[in-house]
Image: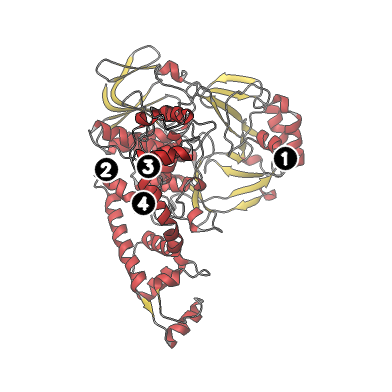
Amino acid sequence: MNFNLTVVGGGHAGLEAAWIAAELGLKVALITSPNVKIGSTPCNPAIGGVGKGQVVREIDAMGGLMGLLADLSGIQYRTLNESKGYAVQSTRVQLDKDIYASNAEKLITSHKNITVIQKKVDKIERDKLGSFLFFDELRDLIVESDKVVVTTGTFLGGVLHRGCEKKKGGRVGCSSSKDLRDLFANVKTLGKKFKTGTPPRLDKNTINFSKMMPQPSDIKANSFHCLHKSSQRFLPQVECYLTRTNEETLEIIRENKEDSPIFNGQIQGVGPRYCPSIEDKAFRYPDRNTHHVFIEPEGLETQSVYPNGVSTSLPASIQESFIRTISGLENVEFLVHGYAVEYDVVDVTQLDETLQSQDIEGLYFAGQINGTSGYEEAAGQGLIAGINAALSFLGKSPLVFNRMDSYIGVMVGDLTSNKRDEPYRLFTARSENRLFIREDNVINRLAPYRKALGQNRALDKFQSQYLEDYNLLSELCESYLYKKNSKNMNYFNQAGYGSLEENITLAELLKRAHLDPVETLFKELNNFGVQFLDSSVRSVAISKKYAGYIKRASTETEKIQKLSLKKINWEMLASSKNISHECRLRISQIRPSSFGQLRQIEGIRPATLAFVAGNFI
């Protein structure tokens, strides 16, 4: 079978790559192992979070699937950082994992341009004409393809660990694939494996929830998919619960350090710093015994519960001992014990900003194989790889997201600029422009990228309507004037707006420190008797609130931006005698294409940047 694009792996990265390429008209094959669900959530069944919620909305604005699937499968919504500024607020949705996977499979298999092939790939080769050839375990040719996106997650060279138990596997109950170098001989790996882990799964019927603090779903949290109503819910909403570890819990873990594969040398892979196992916490914070444990249901019908915060690879008996010291879990029964998995990682410095291999044209990588952690990061990369593989096949220019207007751009820039020494996780703090890169204004930021794809779907019509509303409303806020008169002075006092000592615009009112700009703007529009899209109102209100801060930051940002977009010739830089030997080595290794990418390379000296800025651009 011949295809324009073949995606290897049906996880979150693979879903987005296959879907967007198919939407752009390519004939796509999605190859996935027979015993692995499409769109599965093997760790925490949740989508979104700080920084991650912004990525989900960016994927959605580009026509991706994650936001839509999250809404269709969401059983609890939360707005994180709600007490902080809008710039760092993020949406998080707890999923019914079975419904999520079912919805993902329905969407993918229903697309006329996608063929799902449930086989295990044993070898990928390239023929003399440049096509990629895929073989199964019997060395039978499965697929011939022009472009390839590899999204194999933790399956390449995967090894599972639980206590002294050690066996091959990509996740519990699923076999692993070959090492990356065996699968595709010319691909460079990082040279070391990464590690991730997961907590045990517990039986809901054996938990005493009365000892825990309930966390209800937030009815005001906004849906992810922009074509859904702002607070639309498709499934019944449930509570999660909060409990905590204690001194006895951590004492058991510390007493059994030699049984932990993380500490006894059995696991060599590097784990995520920002999502540590309970063993890591026990020894990283020896004076701290209280850690949050969030008890999160994995679905409406399943009895399986996910205890978020106690990822572990200790032996099963020790897991049972320390888990049962936690309040509410004293008599809990285990459905699956926790474990860790080591897996192969590609050297992302050998990828360009489209996530294509710099050495093998037409080969792209996305997801956990690139050294990232998280479903959202994987999906964002899948989107980028899928778009650019399609554009390349169609003979069109690549689409590279700018880190100044998207978290996907931040992530891809970070990944391709430096070797990963640990699994990458996205944070709002990684962005130099986070006051602007918010959840509420995602269409303002991403519409130009979406327009570049030349699509004409319901999404594109909505975005046009949104932008029209946004511009009209923004002008209204700047032009509508509250004159200083007795009527308006009394109204301001009654509404709690504060004093009116001079004529002010609606935009100036929204900036007042004690007012919520979104509530205020909705109230005023209701008084005016005019209506705009809810999403436009929200974005305008927040944009006006932040306008002063953004303006102060934008001058310096624009200077950096103009310089960052300048193209450079890395080969000329690498041969320049005016640049230090160390910097030339790093430039040769990363092969940056722009000054912005050069700036991101760890170890590049200020003197080198100054020299390049003055002589090469």
Q: Residue furthest front?
A: 578
Which of the marked residues, 2 or 3, is nearer the chain's N terminus? Answer: 2
95 horizontally vs 291: left or right: left
Secondary structure beneath dot 4 equals helix
CA distance for labels 3 and 4:
31 Å
Residue 265 visible, this angle: yes
Q: Which amino acid type is shown beneath numbered disc 4?
A: Arg
The tag on residue 453 is 2
Q: Which mark is on residue 330?
A: 1
Are there few (<14), some (14-19), or many (20+) residues within 10 Å of tag 2?
some
Of marks 3 and 4, which one's residue comes earlier in the chain? 4
When asked about the image quadrant of residue 366, the answer is: top left
Q: Which of the labelled discs sits on residue 614, or is there none? A: 3
Q: Left or right: where does residue 182 sit relative to residue 464?
A: right
- At 26% across and 15% down in the image, what residue appears? 128
- Give the mark nearer the N terminus: 1 vs 4: 1
Q: Nearer the viewer, mark 1 or mark 3?
A: 3
Contact between labelled residues 3 and 1, with CB atoms less than 8 Å apart? no
Amino acid type, label 2 = Leu
Q: What residue is shown with label 4?
A: 445
